[in-house]
Image: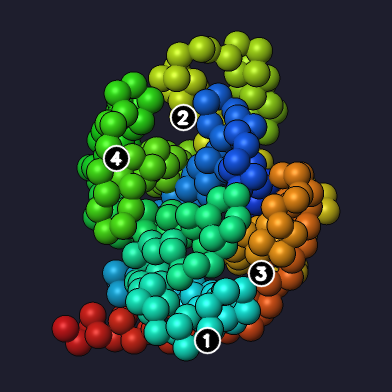
Amino acid sequence: MDNRSNNFDCVRLFAALAVIYGHAFPLALMASPSLLGNSIQAFAVKIFFTISGFLICKSWMNSSNFGGYLAKRVLRIFPALIVLSVVTILLIGPFLTNLSLMDYFSNSTTLNYLQNIRLYPVYNLVDLFSSNAYPSAVNGSLWSLPVEFFMYLFIAVIALKKANGNSPSLLWAATLIACTSSLYFVHYSQPAVHPVFYGTDLISALDVMPYFLIGALYSYYSLERFLNSQVAIFGIGFVALFQPTSAILQETFLYIVAPYAILSFAVTQTPVLHRIGRFGDLSYGIYLYGFLIQQIINSVTGNSLTPFQNAIMSMPIAALCAYISWHAIEKPALKYKVGLNLFFSRGKQHG
């Protein structure tokens, strides 16, 4: 799908910037603005998952083999993440730590931080940001990456390839189970202690997984033909006027309205906005660097900024880092996907 002919880049960029704005509040120990029971940053992540489900399912359906499909996903996620992790350890840490370089590099948490490269979230790095208002995370945004990558693998299992017309699919069942489980465990009876697997809070994962699957449903069944921006605006207005007080009803409304509205705007070509992608796909880089930059700014300013000031300062710096990441790392890495796809295609033929 050519992102120059639609608003996907614009919507993802908006979501990435919204994550920065939302995070500025807890980083100042303040409550984030909310929408139907979701903080701004939580809702922005759900935008990402909706779009990702739509595009990733389409990529899977158009892939000739699993190896080529997986190679594209690996090339999109890992190169920028590896560079971010190394830059954090080798540049940011030594510059901002209060320890000597010997103590810093000999500390067990320094090497342990590299686990982020294998999508195992590690937030602590020696004493980095220990004086910040929110000292417990160097880069809190990394929590969603293992969930995202798991969904890449999961969609290849449940979205059965179509042959000779529509084939039975597990996608509807998986979506229904995910939505029901999320409503119960996230919004009705959340456990006192959240279960954690592979360094990931499973309740947080369960909160966003339905949006990936709903986005995938739109793609798998070609439901984009029913998307309409005017209907989407009506749905948003309806939700704004009749906001339920029940957390379960709020999230149910979001399941229905949010993916429809997000995808309706994304598949549309809006003058000027559809050309945002000409600068590169910056949303992933902004998401990766945003939280870290916000923590750096709070550190060097002594936590003296308001959330709005922190967000406004962080956004252009994150965008610059994302621009460099896209043109120096992400885009060059993606050039290998054609060769890898051919490699796996030949392997399948010879197998």
Q: Position of residue 156 (x, y in %)?
A: 29, 58
First along the sequence among labels 1 and 4: 1
Asked which quadrant contains residue 239, the reply is top right
- In the rendered image, the vertical position of residue 105 relative to residue 137, given as above or below: below
Dot 2 lies on which element?
Answer: helix
The front one of 344 and 327 is 327
Asked which quadrant contains residue 9, the reply is bottom right
The crowding category of the residue bearing disc 1, from other C-alpha atoms within 10 Å (few below 14, some 14 to 19, many at least 20), is few
- In the rendered image, the vertical position of residue 290 relative to residue 344, given as above or below: above
Residue type for callout 2: Tyr
Please report the residue visible at 76 percent of the width from the left and 49 percent of the height from the top: 305
Write down the residue under mark 4.
Answer: 194
Q: Position of residue 42 (x, y in %)?
A: 53, 40
Q: CA distance from mark 2 to mark 4?
A: 23 Å
First along the sequence among labels 4 and 3: 4
Please identify, in this view, whether the residue under mark 2 or under mark 3 is nearer the observer: 3
Write down the residue under mark 2.
Answer: 255
Q: How many marks?
A: 4
Please identify, in this view, whether the residue under mark 2 or under mark 1 is nearer the observer: 1
